[in-house]
Structures are given as C-alpha cells and as structure tokens.
Amino acid sequence: MDYQEHQNTYGLFLWLTRWTVIACLGLLVAMMFGFFGGGGLIGGIAAYIVLMAIAFFLL
C-alpha cells in the first residue's frame, strides 16, 4: 500500500470538505442578508464575496 498517496488524498479530501462547508455557510449568510437584511441581490452578492475573502485570508 502506498501510504503517502493515501495521506495526500485524505489531505485533499479535507481541504475540499472545508471549503465546501465554508462556501455553503457563506451562501446561507449572504442569502439571509439579502432576503432579510434589506441588502437585495447586489448586497447578498457583495456579502458573499466579502465573506469568502475573509475566509480565504483567515485559512
């Protein structure tokens, strides 16, 4: 068995899972801001972009 390849694959899986969860949570927060916060479509998109930028720099 190639343990190094397994570790690389698992690391990639964790990275992809982390960013998928962050993207889903960011989308939910942006939708909440757009629908209930009075931001509308443009405000929701702007909130999503800002949240993803913050997540990118924090992680």
Image: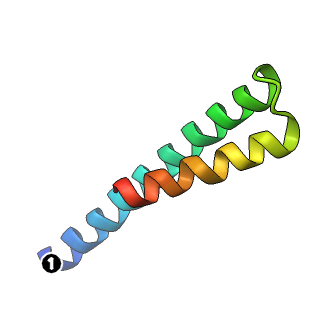
* 45 to 16, vertically: above or below: above
Identify the residue shown where x is 67% and y is 43%.
47
Q: Quadrant of residue 1?
A: bottom left
Using residue 51 as the reference point, say whether residue 17 is left or right of it. Answer: left
| In-front residue for pair 32/20 | 32
Q: Residue furthest top?
A: 36
Q: Quadrant of the C terminus?
A: bottom left
Answer with left or right where residue 16 lies relative to residue 4. right
Q: Is residue 1 visible?
A: no
Above or below, 24 relative to 3: above
User: Which colour scheme appears in the figure?
Assistant: rainbow
Residue pictured at 49% horizontal, 44% vertical: 21
Q: Position of residue 55 (x, y in %)?
A: 45, 51
Residue underneath mark 1: 4
Q: Residue at x 40, y 51 (%)?
A: 18
Q: Position of residue 27 (x, y in %)?
A: 65, 41
In-image side of 45 versus 16 (left or right): right
Q: How many marks?
A: 1
When the figure is inspected, residue 12 is found, relative to residue 38, above or below; the finding is below
**Would you say 28 lies left or right of 17 here?**
right
Query: Of the residues shown, which amino acid type is indicated by label 1?
Result: Gln
- Disc 1 secondary structure class: helix
Depth check, front residue: 38 or 56: 38
Q: Position of residue 36 (x, y in %)?
A: 78, 19
Q: Position of residue 31 (x, y in %)?
A: 73, 33
Q: Residues within 10 Å of mark 1 (few under 14, many from 20)?
A: few
Q: Is residue 34 visible?
A: yes
- Residue occupying the far right of the picture: 41
